[in-house]
Image: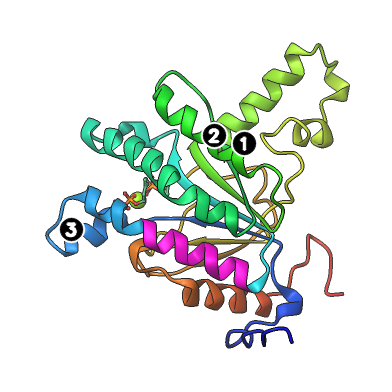
Amino acid sequence: MSPALPPPPDGVDLNGVPAHVACVMDGNGRWASQRGLARTAGHAAGEEALLDTIEGALAIGVRWLTVFAFSTENWRRPRDEVRYLMGFNESLLVRRRDELHEKGVRIRFAGRRDWRVPRRVLRRMDESAELTEANRTMTLTMAFNYGGRAEIVDAVRALVAAGTPAPKIDEKAIRSHLYYPDQPDPDLVVRTSGEYRISNFLLWQLAYSELVFTDVLWPDFRREHLFEAVAEFQRRERRYGGVRG
Ligand code: IPE
Ligand code: IPE
Ligand code: MG
């Protein structure tokens, strides 16, 4: 006999789960200051939030989860914090990749592989991607040294480098040169910490995404908050510029 499936979380219709959820994991620094701790303690506490969010996404059948881990603008932070974030993301991969692999998660990275990202970190990213590349239960994309504008610039540069004539540079051509052309656009974007902005995340892909903002600081975010955001998404009506269907 197969084990009974857990009931769907309150308010979530399992037939209308967004295929792609993207999260701006924000508020780690404030979470730490509220406790009199260093900002880096907030980043460390964000790990549990991320893992619980991944579990929650798997539980309701989200196929694509993209999380903003480090932006092209985050290099502006104090050197110690940047160094901490590099090492933290590296060690998170080492500590968590086997467990994610067992759960059928494919891990990928979106962003620029420039000289500022330590080689060690790139190596861990490559190892994690290789280990999990055949998994298809869910694709977890970590946006790391990622900027939405940089991604569009990189796509246009690739088209120009390939000698694409101007009339052939259309939306389809740009899309097919984004970091992951196989990935559907996010249906739902969740940003924590009470900030109402996009901060250069997935600019091309968010054209018609539903945006949900919550005051919860990222280290306090748990799967229940994800379920609330999905329930909110399911109450929205998407129109894509058309009229009510
Ligand atoms: C998000 O939390 C993590 C990263 C941007 C790396 P923050 O570090 O931005 O936390 P706040 O916004 O300062 O509270
Ligand atoms: C966006 O958060 C980047 C990540 C979550 C990695 P920020 O904290 O960097 O964004 P701003 O500076 O508040 O816009
Ligand atoms: Mg922030």
Query: What segment carries the magenta color?
Result: 47-59
Q: What x and y, as percent, mark residue 86?
A: 35, 35
Asked if the residue at label 3 sits under 8 Å from ligand 1, the reply is yes
Is the image coloured rainbow, by chain, by secondary structure, or in one colour?
rainbow
Residue wearing tag 1: 130
The mark nearer the N terminus, 3 or 1, is: 3
Q: What x and y, as percent, mark residue 178?
A: 69, 34
Badge nearest the viewer, 2 or 3: 2
CA distance separating discs 2 and 3: 34 Å
Which residue is drawn at the image coordinates 69% and 66% (left, top)? 18
Q: Amino acid at mark 3?
A: Ser
Q: Residue pushed farthest left?
A: 36
Q: Quadrant of residue 153?
A: top right
Q: Nearer the viewer, residue 46 or 95?
A: 95
Residue wearing tag 2: 127
Q: Quadrant of residue 234?
A: bottom right
